[in-house]
Amino acid sequence: MYRSHILVCGGTGCTSSGSQQILNALQTEIEKAGLKEEVAVVQTGCHGLCALGPIMLIYPEGTFYSMVNVEDIPEIVTEHLLKGRIVKRLLYNETVTEDGIKSLNETDFYKKQHRIALRNCGVINPENIDEYIGTRGYEALGKVLTEMTSDEVIQVLLDSGLRGRGGGGFPTGLKWKLAKGNDADQKYVCCNADEGDPGAFMDRSVLEGDPHVVLEAMAIAGYAIGANQGYIYVRAEYPIAVARLEIAINQAREYGLLGNNIFGTDFSFDVGLRLGAGAFVCGEETALMTSIEGNRGEPRPRPPFPAQKGLFQKPTILNNVETYANIPQIILNGSEWFSSMGTEKSKGTKVFALGGKIKNTGLVEIPMGTTLREVVEQIGGGIPNGKKFKAAQTGGPSGGCIPVEHFDIPIDYDNLISIGSMMGSGGLIVMDEDNCMVDIAKFFLEFTVDESCGKCTPCRIGTKRMLEILDKITKGNGTLEDLDKLEDLCYYIKDNSLCGLGQTAPNPVLSTLRYFRDEYIAHVVDKKCPSGVCKSLLSYTIDADKCKGCTLCARTCPNNAIEGKVREPHVIIQDKCIKCGACMEKCKFGAISKK
């Protein structure tokens, strides 16, 4: 028995900050101190508070150390592990109170969360199947195979109200029911782990922190619809997730939890990995299946739907990682347990990747119906630097911007659609008063144009024409007629594109036109960017009364656009100014302003 367990985050965020070096240093220092038999070091998945990485938790105290460096390790081992003295300077400040140290679950970031899909992330070693089994892992699969019929499994999901977490929100139980009802000599279960939205890292974190939950859920799905083969389609840019999935699949096979005659029954099921090359369109279900088949990832017309003719023209179900991560807990705890959370039409919880202009960047799992204000101000810690909230983008390039007038909207599928946004897979990008909404729309459209597969004309050509208009507007050359043309194009592309990528591509433009039309008009009529973002509409000037002639701005300018003598006011040559803002940033006297 170990007297202490040290959990070190091994997710992508903390790994990029050096958590592997911290892990190595811990093991070295623990051995030096003679504590190897008393202290266990465990590499886990993401804890959620990515902004504070690298992260380390020490139990049984529950001490949460954040932003740990390799140089801190000897002190942690000597003071905390040997002498029992907590290193207070490394503690997450919210856990420190006048009365002592409070639990991590009592902090603002965690206390409103309810972790179901993320329940094991940051808790277990994802590369050890025994630790997953120790948290009731594979118990749901055993229950399904030995106590339930396939119809009963599907009914539990239908009663739970679980909807697809990949963005579409289609009822999971209904999807499985449709696939089960189609007879075929072969059926397939697929997992969408492609996750291409900018700023989204929910599925990656589940795969890195709890890969076995996806394998267990896919096996349950196979039993429910009558399939014996599954495929996980994961992007190759997720090397840690891919490596841990490979380890998990091999361990599950070794334990007889994948393969033939699972749990001694006549049910057989196996899982294969297929790596994607980073094409956003392969997040669309038919394009994903086309890619698994070895062809270029392009969508197919629907109907027929995958439940009728999917992978290799056989009945197929496709769910994303987060959807699967909920299923074993629903089987174990019952449909009423899951449906008691959330709203009337959106049950359970939702995982969001919280990013942008927010204090607590990271991964959160909240009950459906939690308001946007609660997520931003309480869980997210608010907007840094005293700035005001302006908008939140949900659903990535397929979603829309939620303005401050809807700050108190309860987050669920139907509410977001009603205001011109959508849940998407769970990216939530927060913007403050310094963001230009025309520029934001242009950013997402640039992404969509780049990622369009080009199969259908509305998406291939229409999105390019939209981008051209937005580019014209941000350069100060737009007209009011361009705004009308832009809106017409949006609705045409929405109505005529082949797949979901094209159909939702206009959403960021439509939502910003709807809620921030005044910014578009300012760009077109006044030739100004109210937020001071669009470079073509900016100018920098030097106040002669404030300028001391220190020459720092002239020495900083990369294009020699500032002239003046020492101790005399300087001037900016507008034709040469590239509007990088370096001069304004360096000026110590506040003499340079942006207009």
Image (cartoon, rainbow, N blue to C red):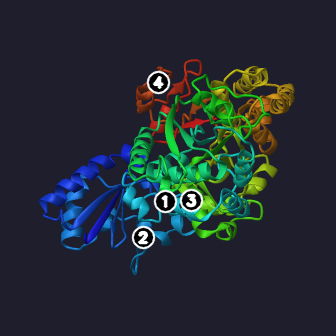
Disc 2 marks a residue whose amino acid type is Thr
Nearer to the camera, 568 or 356? 356
- Single out the mark in the foreground, 3 or 2: 3
Residue 427's tag is none
Instruction: Check the picture and name the quadrant holding the C terminus.
Output: top right
Q: Which residue is denoted by mark 3 in the rendering? A: 145
Q: Earlier in the sequence, mark 1 or mark 3?
A: 1
Q: Judging from the image, what secondary structure is the residue with disc 4 in?
A: loop
Q: Earlier in the sequence, mark 1 or mark 4?
A: 1
Seen in the picture, residue 522 relative to 564 is either above or below; the reply is below
Q: Judging from the image, what secondary structure is the residue with disc 1 in?
A: loop
Image spot of residue 193 (x, y percent): 55, 41
Q: Which residue is denoted by mark 4 in the rendering? A: 564
Q: Judging from the image, what secondary structure is the residue with disc 3 in?
A: helix
Q: Judging from the image, what secondary structure is the residue with disc 2 in?
A: helix
Tell me if label 2 and label 1 are in contact, CB under 8 Å. Answer: no
Q: Which residue is denoted by mark 1 in the rendering? A: 138
Q: Residue at x 72, y 50 (%)?
A: 169
Image spot of residue 478 (x, y percent): 78, 25
Alpha carbon of mark 1 to alpha carbon of mark 4: how far?
74 Å
Q: Residue furthest bottom?
A: 99
Whether residue 218 is visible to the viewer of this picture, yes or no, is yes
- Single out the mark in the foreground, 1 or 4: 1
Disc 1 marks a residue whose amino acid type is Tyr
Q: Earlier in the sequence, mark 4 or mark 2?
A: 2
